[in-house]
Amino acid sequence: MLINQNSSRLYVVDALRGFAIISIMLIHNLEHFDYYFLPENLSPWMKALDKQVWDVLFFLFAGKSYAIFALLFGLTFFIQSDNQAKKGKDFRGRFAWRLILLLGFGIINSAFYQGDILTIYAIIGFGLIPVAKLKDSWVLIIATLLMLQPYEWINFACALLHPEVAPANPASWAYFGKMGEYIPKDSFIDTVVGNLTNGRPAVFNWSWENGRVFQTLSLFMLGMLAGRKGLFKESDSNIRFWKKALVISLVAFIPLFQAKTNVGTWYTSEALIRPLGVILSSWANLAFMIFLVSSFVLLFRTSLFNKALNLLAPIGRMSLSNYIIQSILGSFIYYGFGLGMYQFTGATHCLIIGICLAILQGIFSTWWLHVHKQGPLESLWHKATWVGRQD
C-alpha cells in the first residue's frame, strides 16, 4: 500500500536521502574511509572479484551520491525558508546560524573521518543566502554558469596558449601522502590531530581541484529550484517531468561518460587533459545523478517498490546522525587505533561490512524514530537553530 503522499512530509525525499547516505557509506567502506590500501596475499580470483566490485560501485555512486545529498540540501533550505515565509519571517539569518552549527558538527566528524563534507557544505551553503530571493530564471542562470565549471575553462584556455607547460602536481597530493603517518598508527589522538591538521586541507584542496565547489553550490541552487517547483510532490505533471528527466539524463550521460573516459586520447598535454577531465567528470556525474534520482522517484511512486524503498526513509530522516555515526564506526573498523581492518579487507569484504552497517543503521533509525520525533543530532541541531526564538 502506498504511503499517503498528500501529507506535508515528502517521504520520497526522506527515502532518497537515505539512499544517498547508504550509498555514500558503501563507497567509504571500499576506500577504508579514505585510507587506500591493497591487502597482501589475496588470491588471484579475489583480486579479480574486488576489482569488479570496486568498478561497479564507483561507477554507480562515486560523485553521484554526494550530488544527490547536495541537491537535497538545497531542497531542505527551500522547505525551511518557505515554512518561515508563510509566517511572515525571513529564514536567511537563522540559516546562517544553522550553517555555523553545521560547521561545528563537521569539525567533530572530521576528527574521525577527514573526508567529511559537512564542513564544506557549511561554508558553501552561505552562497544560498544572496540568491534566496532571486527569481527562478536568475537562479537557474547562476546555477548553470557554476555547473559549467568556469575556473576549469579558464585553465583550459590558458593551457591552449602554452600546452607544453606541465602543470604542477595538485596541492592535495602532498597532504594525502602524509596520511600514512597517522591513520595506520595505534594512537587515536594522533589520528584526530592528523585528520584535522592534514586531512582537512587535503580534502579542501581536493574538492577545489575536482570542481566540487562550483558543482556543489550549483546543486544547492538546483535543489532550491526543485523545491520552488514542487517537483517531489505527487502529481501527474511531476511524473511526466521525471520520466523526461530520466530519458534526457541517460541520453546525455552516455556521450559524456565516453568523453570523460577517452579525454586522455584527445591530447598529449596534461595541462589540457586535467581541466577538461574535471569538466567532463562533473557533467557526467550530474547526468547520472539525475538518472538515479528520476529512477528512484518513479519507482517510489509504484506499489511494487514503494514499501521497499520507504525502508530507507528513517535513515534519511536521521541523515546527520547516521553520517557521523558511520564515520565513527568506519574509522574504528579500519584505522590503526581500532581494529585495523584496512590491512585485511579488499573491496568485496568491505562491501559486506558496509551492507551490514547499513542494515544496523536502518534498524537503529527505525527504532529511534518510533520513540523520538527526530534523530539525536537532528534534535540538537534543531534546538540550537531556534535558540532564543520568540514566536
Image: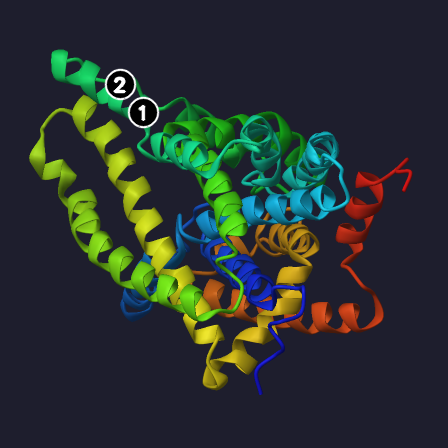
Tag count? 2
Residue 215: image location, x then y, percent: 41, 36
Circle 1 packing at 10 Å, graded few (<14), some (14-19), many (20+), is: some
The residue under the point 29% across, 43% down is 283
Residue 267 against residue 112 in the figure, above or below: above
Quadrant hosting residue 99: top right
The quarter in which the C terminus is drawn is top right
Which circle marks residue 154 in the picture? 2
Instruction: Name the residue beneath numbered marker 1.
Output: 150
Q: Position of residue 324 (x, y in %)?
A: 67, 50
- Is 180 rendered above or below residue 338? above
Q: Amino acid at mark 2?
A: Ile
Asked if marks 1 and 2 touch (Cβ < 8 Å), the reply is: yes
As displayed, is residue 390 above or below residue 197? below
Q: Residue at x 57, y 37 (%)?
A: 121
Q: Quadrant of residue 206?
A: top left
Label 1, secondary structure: give it.
Answer: helix
Residue 320 is situated, as x and y percent measured from the top left of the image, at 67, 51
Q: Residue at x 18, y 46 (%)?
A: 261
Binning the other alpha carbons within 10 Å of mark 2 as few (below 14), some (14 to 19) or many (20 upward) gives few
Seen in the picture, residue 309 relative to 147 is either above or below; the reply is below
Looking at the image, can residue 104 be seen?
yes
Which residue occupies the foreground of this view, 119 or 298? 298
Q: Which mark is residue 364?
A: none
Horizontal side of residue 388 vs 196, given as left or right: right
Q: Residue at x 38, y 67 (%)?
A: 295
Q: Is residue 155 left or right of residue 234?
A: left
Q: CA distance from mark 1 to mark 2?
A: 6 Å
Three-letter amino acid code of the residue under disc 1? Pro
